[in-house]
């Protein structure tokens, strides 16, 4: 893969990861309720679950490419459409939200927190759909092995997510009151995330033909 493509992926992924999503809220809940250590263990579990989706996605995308190059192009356009859909859905949910809430997480032992976090992420179909929609936008069959490219992007994404999630876990306990009382901030975050998804989806739709 070209360095410029990887760098573009890093920028896009880092931008999306800055805005807290459901997994981040779960991690913050653990950190707030049981401390930073529990939050970091949750981060490890979520990272493991994400890695499973990356591996499954690499196998799936490879199978699609083996079918035909046209099928791969269709997947990329469907992925772009899904990103736009996510953006619109996030914007609508921002309009309907009435408060910023951190989900309460029951207290558990660290080992249970780890495998529970991993299982929650593995069983989340939205993660798989997001990876299948997002990663192919930066993959080119002419650049080499598609599974290797997918795994490389997945590894980069997991590392970035681990760093981002760890920072949220470390900061959550110290800013608990602000987190729980920021209704306006929650809506703003949702709107920013929604627009980011839409922009990324539109960009991917126009960029896809030149990458295949």
Image: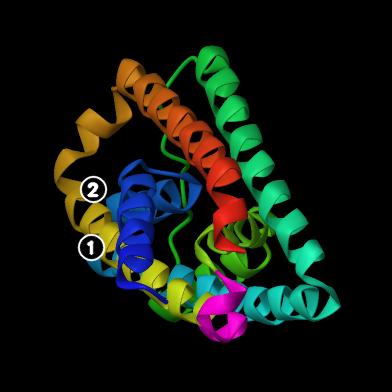
Marking on residue 36: 1
Element assignment for label 1:
helix
Main SS of the magenta part reads helix
- Whether 68 is drawn above or below 28: the answer is below
Q: Position of residue 176 (x, y in %)?
A: 23, 38
Q: Residue at x 60, y 34 (%)?
A: 84
Label 1 crowd bin: few (<14), some (14–19), many (20+), radius 10 Å:
many
Q: Residue at x 17, y 39 (%)?
A: 175
Q: Are marks 1 and 2 in contact (CB under 8 Å)?
A: yes
Q: Which residue is mark 2?
A: 172
Can you name the residue that lies furthest to the left here? 174
Task: Write the start and end of the magenta stretch as one range.
Answer: 140-148
When the figure is inspected, residue 148 is found, relative to residue 129, above or below; the finding is: below
At 74% from the left and 65% from the top, the residue drawn is 72
Q: How is the image coloured?
A: rainbow
Q: Reply yes or no: does residue 72 show up in magenta.
A: no
Mark 2, other Cα within 10 Å: few <14 / some 14–19 / many ≥20: many
Q: Whole-Å distance between the Cαs marked 1 and 2?
A: 8 Å
Drawn side of residue 135 relative to residue 78, left or right: left
Task: State which quarter of the image contains the C terminus.
Answer: bottom right
Q: For this rendering, which residue is in front, 91 or 69?
A: 69
Residue 191 or 45: which is nearer the viewer?
A: 191
Vertical side of 50 occupied by 146: above or below: below
Residue 194: image tag: none
Tell me where residue 126 appears, x and y as whole percent: 65, 53
Image coordinates for residue 15, horizontal then vertical, percent: 32, 46
């Amino acid at each position: 893969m070209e360095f410029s493509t990887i760098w573009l992926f890093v920028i896009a992924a880092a931008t999306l990861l800055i805005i807290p999503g459901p997994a981040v809220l779960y991690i913050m809940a653990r950190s707030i309720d049981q401390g930073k250590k529990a939050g970091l263990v949750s981060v490890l579990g979520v990272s493991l679950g994400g890695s499973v989706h990356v591996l499954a996605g690499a196998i799936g995308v490879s199978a699609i490419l083996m079918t035909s190059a046209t099928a791969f192009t269709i997947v990329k356009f469907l992925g772009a459409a899904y990103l736009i859909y996510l953006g619109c859905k996030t914007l609508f949910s921002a309009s309907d939200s009435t408060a910023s809430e951190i989900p309460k997480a029951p207290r558990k032992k660290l080992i249970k927190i780890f495998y529970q976090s991993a299982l929650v992420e593995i069983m989340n179909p939205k993660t798989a759909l997001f990876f299948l929609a997002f990663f192919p936008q930066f993959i080119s069959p002419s650049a080499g092995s598609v599974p290797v490219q997918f795994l490389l992007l997945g590894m980069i994404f997991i590392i970035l997510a681990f760093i981002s999630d760890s920072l949220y876990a470390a900061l959550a306990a110290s800013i608990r009151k602000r987190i729980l009382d920021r209704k306006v901030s929650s809506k703003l975050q949702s709107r920013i995330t929604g627009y980011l998804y839409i922009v990324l989806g539109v960009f991917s739709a126009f960029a896809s033909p030149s990458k295949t």
